[in-house]
Amino acid sequence: MRAAEVVPGEPDESRVVDRPEPEAAGDLLVEGLLAGVCGTDVEIVRDGFGTLPPGRDRMVPFHESLGRVISSPTPDFAPGDLVVGVVRRPDPEPCPACAVDAWDFCRNGRYTERGIKELDGYGAQRWTVPPKFAIALDAGLGDAGVLTEPASVVAKAWAQAEAAAARTHLPVRTALITGAGPIGLLAALLGVQRGLDVHVVDRVTDGRKPDLVTALGATYHPDVDRVGVDVDVAVECTGVAPLVWECARRASVTVLAGIAGEHDPVPLDPHVFDEVVLGNKALVGTVNAGLPDYRAAADALADAPAAWLNGLITRRVPLERFTEAFEKGEDDVKVVVDLA
């Protein structure tokens, strides 16, 4: 079979190779269909983020998966089923969170992650996954099933937002989403599915992003200052400091789903903290996802308009040229690698 291989921090070492067929040994054997590409994959290849599997000098990339079951050791999955693989695995200790299958909240950092930390990813024409870490998808999702992993991150963000809102008896009616990338658009989708008045902010003024937001029935704004409604919940997907503080100022609950990365520091108005304290507001960070979030994501995607979901996949790159997926196009939303 063919598989992508990368060396963290050495983009010139990226290649496609022949690898032995995987042995299932009690796992699902899966035909890889698509792998989604996100900023984490670019950081691994270009900046050296991530950790190689022990004793290895290369790894198979990509943590966003979509495959079709070839064989299964359990009746919970059947040949032909569409599946995705969970990214994170619990630590061997385990910590209190991993002990209850909440490995997305791992407390000691000894978790592993497919395609990121010490485990090969899903960028191969065949891969295996333990049944516990596989999520069955609605057959009608087709290629849009590759959006399950980013949607799971969003499902977790909404679960965290609703838990924080419940502690202050806040009826959630309006939502502000900052950033109209895949995470922001999926956050908007789940907000609309909750019956909320959703407002999405992104600096892009034309192209497919505004159209995708409008098609959901949400409102698109090229500037946060144009959002003229009271905000109950904000999901901040950019990591851009001014937007973080603006969300904290406006919303009763803000979920931080974006990473700042390398940005110049910006002045902080200390009154933001006064507003957080005096308003009993909540700022919650979230990353990764657990099994309930994957299942919620699969359900949300199954209930979404198929044409809208497929509109998020803006470019397909063949496996043999997978490095082209790391070059972001002007109108890209979600780029995928076609493993076939």
Image: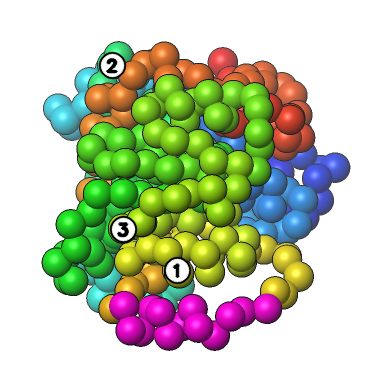
Mark 1 neighbour density, 10 Å: few (under 14) some (14–19) many (20 or more): many
Q: Position of residue 154 (x, y in %)?
A: 38, 47
Q: What's under tag 1, amino acid-wise?
A: Ala
Please name the predominant secondary structure of the magenta segment in the image. Answer: helix
237 over 251 or under it: above or below = above
Give the CA distance from mark 1 to mark 3.
11 Å
Q: Secondary structure at mark 2?
A: helix
Mark 2 neighbour density, 10 Å: few (under 14) some (14–19) many (20 or more): few
Give the CA distance from mark 3 to mark 2.
35 Å
Q: Which residue is mark 1?
A: 248
* Residues rendered magenta in the picture: 267-279
Q: Position of residue 242 (x, y in %)?
A: 61, 65
Give the CA distance from mark 1 to mark 2.
40 Å
Badge 3 or badge 2: first in the primary sequence: 2
Q: Secondary structure at mark 1?
A: helix
Query: Which residue corresponds to the image point at 73% horizontal and 58% vertical from the top-left?
Result: 48
Q: Which residue is mark 2?
A: 139
Query: Which residue corresponds to the image point at 23% horizontal and 58% vertical from the top-left?
Result: 162
Q: What's under tag 3, amino acid-wise?
A: Asp
**Is residue 184 among the parts visible in the rendering?**
no
20 over 104 or under it: above or below = above
